[in-house]
């Protein structure tokens, strides 16, 4: 370290960033001390990633200044930031899946000999870095990135930043895609890096992780820095309050246990995923009316495929699906909609709504063969219009204008509209995939309450979510999915979050990190 | 482009056309001709006389029909570049079926009407099948429809050309062509009497536009189609089978293209020649449709514009030394400009013409 | 990515194309049992096939560079038309109806320069103004189909040029342009797989953000590949002209779909320049079959035999059409809102 201990590694002063009329960062101050880990905590959309993208040269700030190691800097591009020693590990990895680990690490910084890439020199440098931090990345340099699991990809990203000479590392939500065991391993890596004098910024919305690893924590809310605290002097409740601005209740909602008839029965279901790999492996499930069955699991363990199988979007290899006793395994998506399977899709942007359509046109999406909106082939736009207006009213969609395009709405309002539409035609089964992902807190509560109400009205609801709090809060039973199978079905009142975490990692509580030196092809995760 | 407001679309269409014509005029001037005279001939040749107007309407009928065929496919997100081939197959099927069946029917107006119906049906079937083929290849074989439809255009030209010169050649004709349709096979021509134009043809065209517009806007099939064009993933979510949709879209598009081929044969040509010489209606239709932002109703003014240009082209060919291929180049430029709405948005912004919303 | 990987995956597709060519021969031979295969497949036939393959291979190499970097240049056909026409016009301007070999080479250079100038404009529309790549590419074709014959008519009073000169062969009666093309294909392979520019091109097409965050300007990479694709298509058109010896502007012009076939050639070659060139050679062979049939006296309708390459494109595209396109093809890239 050349800079003295009193000079902070990074200092941001009065950073303001506006996107059109939206203020993403409002005069934010932030200081990262040398050789420390500083967590940047906040809800989705609180401006964490924007702030760090400014530090990394991806965005220009409207106001404010950046200094790195005591020198004021203007970053026009990530290259400038990198030259100043700032590296960033993005939430969506900045890797090229079809290229090898080696090509990815050296991308943009290839050592060249006579115009050709000097392979040997590149390997040597990567091996040096890996042996210094005990990384395993040098053992699969010639493997294509798409064949690695997400934990290994993340380490490739870190090595890439170090290769480029970073001594300030920004990690954007690094734990979001990892299993609990991989998270532990990442925490170790971060601690090692701190030992070696690296300074790290850890972006997260998870309180426990920030408390575990960080030296200091800065909380952002609605683009403003609410405060910076030393980890030793704060508690989870304090931080939560700073994040959301009010007391949060993590408690489960009380309810009567359900005794309805089975509405959806799945028997021995097997399905293949996009890369022809078996993603759903002999799943049995029964969903009763008036019940919420939660499916927990780390993303990519077959939940999406299972949901697509039930809703009719993906064909089934083996097994049967019965709706109210009738076999619907071979029935296409449209007929399943008509027969009462409603679906809140995982990806509302690309599946649940047509972004360029008005809400009125979107109110017809999926309902285009159902009376009263359609009379044979002929559409009745007046009915559709009324329906849209009802949803907007009943679900408090903002702005309350059925002629607004779906793309102009915020995520929460888009989601409320979808929930309203899907319930509209009185279904028997509702499949809700990540129903509150990327949704503001107010809308989350609204949607949760609505789901509970629908349960009371006798609907059978299948909820898939990677948020444990959500699953525990809503479900009558929780099925944990791992590598295409239900590892266990548990009672939400009787299970701890730790146990759930272990189940999600495959029920094998071991201290060994799951990623061994030899990467499993397509192991564990899927890319999104 | 799809999210643009209707007004903006119209503005972009007009700006594209004017820019293309302007560049065309510069080229006319650089090539050593008189651009003012050229503009004059454009106007006179398209709308300057009753004859010119009828000629413009004749071409427009075909441009609008083929333009609607393109619009159907493009709106659904399927790039049917093969309307030219489907138009040729349709028209040729009309000739073959009418010439083949005529001897079995009475040689009078009743027979003529039946033959027209049969010929049109043959064209629709031929055009629809010839378009369904690349649809099936795309849906079930993953073959890019842009490339296969272009190849099928080349194949239609070669194949029909071979048949016209061989098996279906009229031995009594001096030129290489098929036998002529019987005289009594013709559309009635009220009000306007022109051997190559009939108001009935125009009405058929308008009825087709109206039918396609209603299907797209007011039926669940149309909603499925348009939704597929906007956002494939959302259409799948809403229960559209993407593979079947591709095939139905292509077939629908080819049916309209085939109908255009029938109108061309029955109303205008009366026989078939080597298809490399029948005119590029199916290609220019792409420009027509894009200019109309793939809206079937918008195709009408766009088709009139192209009909006018084509009509002026025939006038210029006779009355001027400016090579008529210039018109094709201008059509290409129109397409180029339509592809870049952002260009006009930026210009509008810079010059303050864009209004406050952009 | 290793060479072995590519050849393994590409060979299936190329095998399909070889099969098609063999079937075409087989069908031809059943029409006549008089003529032996050795009379059909001669040295002259192979050499003419090479000659026919060069324009397709050049366009294919250019097109695959653009697409690898994330821009689908479907204007190749149009740029070939411009290349062929500019070469003819240059030859005529320098040497009238009897240009020298020097004029031929000057014409090749001029064609590349004209194509580069036009592609720069095209690239600005695609990359800076985010034009719809498919529509703009089609437009280039239409513009070429209109303005090349127009200008021909202005210069020569007809859509086609009078007879000019074709390029003289060098050793073994081979055109030097075949050697040039082989050189370009090999060099393209080396640049794509052995230099950092190749890595950047691949990254720009697969995950432009990754390249951007590595500090490389994605759009500069794309400008370079699109302009290269135009230059190669233009050169391809000029080579076609230099072999033919005059410009034909009737119908779909003398280029007659070769740019489109170039696109298919690189799809077969799985975006590998050498694979693309091999596919181009097979298309060249199909193209020459007609001439060869006439030479040896097989009486097949030439109109139909001429359609063989187009049919081959459809058959092979359908049977082996599912190539994996680069992820980001067709998406304009902006690093900041």
Image: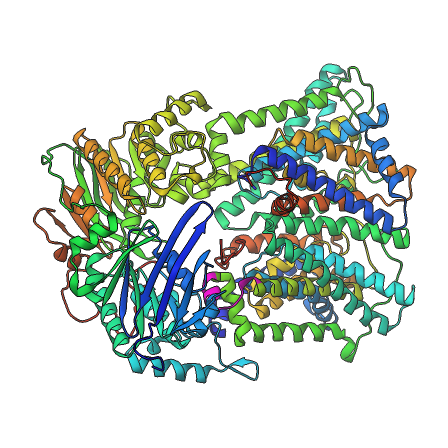
Number of numbered labels in the structure image: 0
Please tell me in which quadrant of the rendered image residue C105 appears: bottom right
- Is the N terminus of chain B in the top left, top right, bottom left or bottom right quadrant? top right
The dominant secondary structure in magenta is helix
Q: Is residue A73 above or below residue A129?
A: above
* Residue A484 x %, y %: 24, 54
Residue drawn at x 78%, y 76% is C173
Does the magenta-highlighted stretch encompass residue B273? Answer: no
- Residue B94 in view: no
Q: How are the residues colored?
A: rainbow
Left or right: C160 with respect to A218? right
The residue shown at (38%, 27%) is A388
Q: In this view, does A331 lie above or below B218?
A: below
Asked if residue C211 is among those painted magenta in the image, a careful observer would answer yes
Quarter of the image containing the C terminus of chain B? top right
Residue closest to the eye, A456 or C171 = A456
Q: Position of residue B296 (x, y in %)?
A: 61, 31
Q: Is residue A387 visible?
A: yes
Left or right of A214, for residue B176: right
Q: Residue furthest left?
A: A494
Comparing A145 with B32, the one in front is B32
Which residue is at 54% across, 65% downward?
C217
> Residue A346: image x %, image y %?
33, 45
Q: Image quadrant of residue A516?
A: bottom left
Task: Report the magenta residues as a range.
Answer: C209-219
Percent across and percent down for residue A28 are: 36, 57
């Amino acid at each position: 370290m050349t800079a003295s201990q009193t000079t902070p590694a990074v200092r941001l002063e009065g950073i303001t960033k506006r996107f059109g009329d939206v203020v993403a960062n409002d005069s934010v101050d932030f200081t990262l001390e040398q050789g420390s880990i500083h967590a940047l905590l906040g809800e989705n959309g609180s401006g964490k990633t924007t702030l760090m993208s400014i530090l990394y040269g991806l965005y220009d700030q409207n106001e404010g200044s950046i200094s790195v190691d005591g020198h004021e800097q203007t970053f026009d591009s990530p290259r400038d930031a990198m030259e100043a020693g700032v590296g960033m590990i993005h939430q969506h990895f900045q890797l090229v899946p079809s290229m090898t680990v080696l090509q990815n690490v050296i991308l943009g910084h290839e050592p060249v000999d006579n115009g050709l890439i000097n392979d040997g020199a590149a390997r040597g440098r990567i091996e040096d870095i890996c042996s210094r931090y005990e990384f395993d990345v040098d053992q699969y340099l010639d493997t294509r990135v798409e064949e690695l699991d997400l934990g290994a990809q993340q380490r490739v990203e870190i090595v890439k930043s170090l290769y480029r000479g970073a001594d300030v590392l920004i990690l954007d939500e690094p734990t979001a895609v990892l299993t609990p065991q991989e998270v532990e391993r990442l925490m170790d890596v971060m601690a090692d890096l701190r030992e070696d004098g690296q300074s790290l910024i850890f972006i997260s919305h998870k309180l426990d992780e920030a408390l575990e690893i960080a030296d200091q924590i800065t909380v952002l809310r609605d683009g403003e820095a609410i405060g910076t605290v030393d980890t030793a002097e704060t508690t989870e409740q304090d931080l939560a309050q700073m994040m959301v601005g009010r007391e949060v209740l993590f408690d489960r909602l009380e309810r009567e246990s359900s005794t309805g008839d089975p509405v959806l029965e799945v028997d021995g279901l097997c399905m293949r995923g996009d890369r022809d790999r078996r993603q759903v492996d002999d799943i049995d499930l029964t969903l009763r009316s008036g019940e919420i069955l939660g499916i927990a699991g780390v993303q990519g363990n077959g939940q999406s495929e299972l949901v697509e199988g039930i809703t009719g979007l993906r064909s089934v290899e083996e097994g049967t699906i019965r709706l109210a006793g009738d076999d619907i395994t071979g029935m296409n998506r449209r007929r399943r909609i008509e027969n009462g399977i409603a679906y809140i899709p995982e990806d509302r942007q690309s599946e649940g709504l047509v972004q360029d359509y008005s809400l009125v046109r979107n109110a017809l999406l999926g309902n285009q063969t159902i009376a009263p909106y359609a009379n044979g082939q002929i559409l009745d736009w007046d009915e559709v219009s009324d329906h849209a207006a009802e949803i907007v009213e009943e679900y408090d969609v903002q702005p309350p204008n059925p002629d607004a395009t779906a793309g102009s709405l915020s995520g929460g309002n888009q989601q409320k509209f979808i929930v309203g539409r899907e319930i509209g035609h009185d279904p028997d089964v509702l499949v809700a995939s990540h129903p509150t992902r990327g949704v503001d807190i107010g809308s989350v509560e609204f949607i949760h309450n609505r789901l509970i109400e629908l349960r009371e009205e006798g609907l059978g609801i299948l909820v898939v979510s990677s948020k444990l709090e959500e699953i525990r809060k809503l479900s009558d039973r929780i099925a944990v999915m791992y590598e295409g199978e239900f590892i266990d079905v548990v009672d939400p009142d009787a299970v701890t979050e730790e146990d759930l975490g272990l189940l999600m990692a495959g029920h094998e509580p071991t201290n060994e990190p799951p990623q061994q030196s030899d990467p499993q092809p397509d192991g564990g995760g899927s890319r999104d | 482009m799809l999210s643009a407001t209707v007004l903006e679309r119209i503005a972009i269409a007009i700006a594209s056309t004017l820019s293309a014509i302007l560049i065309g005029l510069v080229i006319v001037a650089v090539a050593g001709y008189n651009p003012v005279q050229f503009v004059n001939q454009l106007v006179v040749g398209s709308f300057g006389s009753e004859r010119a107007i009828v000629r413009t309407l004749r071409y427009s009928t075909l441009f609008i029909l083929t333009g609607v065929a393109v619009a159907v496919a493009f709106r659904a997100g399927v790039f049917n570049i093969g309307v030219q081939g489907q138009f040729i197959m349709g028209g040729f099927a009309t000739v073959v079926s009418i010439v083949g069946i005529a001897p079995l029917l009475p040689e009078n107006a009743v027979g003529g009407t039946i033959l027209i119906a049969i010929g049109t049906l043959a064209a629709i079937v031929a055009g629809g099948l010839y378009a369904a083929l690349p649809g099936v290849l795309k849906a079930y074989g993953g073959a890019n429809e842009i490339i296969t439809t272009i190849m099928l255009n080349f194949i239609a030209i070669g194949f029909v050309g071979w048949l016209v010169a061989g098996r279906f050649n009229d031995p009594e004709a001096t030129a290489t062509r098929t036998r002529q349709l019987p005289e009594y096979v013709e559309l009635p021509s009220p009000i306007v009497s022109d051997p190559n134009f009939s108001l009935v043809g125009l009405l058929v065209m308008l009825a087709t536009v109206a039918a396609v517009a209603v299907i797209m806007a007011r039926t669940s099939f149309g909603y499925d189609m348009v939704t597929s064009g906007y956002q494939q993933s959302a259409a799948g979510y809403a229960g559209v089978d993407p593979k079947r949709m591709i095939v139905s879209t292509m077939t629908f598009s080819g049916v309209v293209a085939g109908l255009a081929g029938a109108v061309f044969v029955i109303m205008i040509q009366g026989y078939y020649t080597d298809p490399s010489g029948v005119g590029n209606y199916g290609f220019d239709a792409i420009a027509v449709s894009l200019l109309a932002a793939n809206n079937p109703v918008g195709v009408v003014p766009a088709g009139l514009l192209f009909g006018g240009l084509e009509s002026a082209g025939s006038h210029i060919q006779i009355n001027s030394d400016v090579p008529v291929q210039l018109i094709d180049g201008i059509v290409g430029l129109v397409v180029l400009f339509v592809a870049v709405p952002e260009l006009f948005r930026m210009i509008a912004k810079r010059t303050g013409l864009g209004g406050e919303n952009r | 990515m290793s060479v072995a990987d590519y050849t393994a995956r590409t060979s299936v597709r190329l095998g399909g194309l070889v099969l098609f060519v063999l079937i075409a021969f087989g069908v031809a031979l059943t029409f006549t049992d008089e003529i032996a295969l050795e009379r059909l497949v001669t040295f002259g036939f192979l050499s003419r096939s090479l000659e026919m393959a060069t324009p397709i291979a050049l366009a294919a190499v250019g097109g695959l560079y653009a697409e690898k970097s994330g821009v689908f240049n479907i204007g190749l056909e149009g740029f070939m038309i411009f290349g062929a026409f500019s070469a003819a016009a240059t030859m005529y301007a320098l040497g009238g109806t009897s240009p020298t070999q020097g004029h031929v080479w000057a014409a090749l250079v001029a064609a590349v320069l004209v194509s580069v100038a036009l592609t720069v404009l095209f690239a600005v529309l695609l990359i800076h103004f985010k034009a719809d790549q498919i529509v703009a590419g089609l437009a280039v074709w239409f513009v070429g189909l209109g303005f090349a014959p127009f200008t021909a008519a202005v210069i020569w009073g007809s859509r086609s040029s009078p007879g000019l000169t074709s390029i003289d062969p060098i050793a073994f009666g081979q055109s030097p342009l075949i050697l040039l093309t082989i050189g370009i294909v090999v060099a393209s392979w080396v640049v794509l797989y052995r230099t950092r520019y190749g890595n950047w091109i691949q990254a720009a097409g697969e995950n432009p953000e990754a390249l951007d965050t590595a500090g490389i300007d994605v759009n500069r990479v794309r400008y370079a590949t699109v302009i290269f694709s135009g230059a190669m298509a233009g050169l391809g058109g000029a080579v076609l002209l230099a072999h033919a010896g005059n410009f034909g502007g009737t119908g779909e012009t003398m280029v007659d779909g070769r740019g489109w076939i170039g696109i298919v050639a690189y799809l077969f070659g799985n975006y590998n320049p050498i694979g693309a060139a091999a596919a181009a050679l097979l298309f060249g062979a199909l193209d020459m079959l007609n001439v060869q049939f006439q030479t040896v006296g097989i009486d097949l309708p030439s109109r139909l035999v001429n359609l063989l390459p187009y049919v081959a494109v459809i058959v092979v595209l359908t049977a082996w059409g599912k190539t994996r396109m680069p992820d980001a093809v067709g998406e304009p890239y902006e690093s900041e809102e």
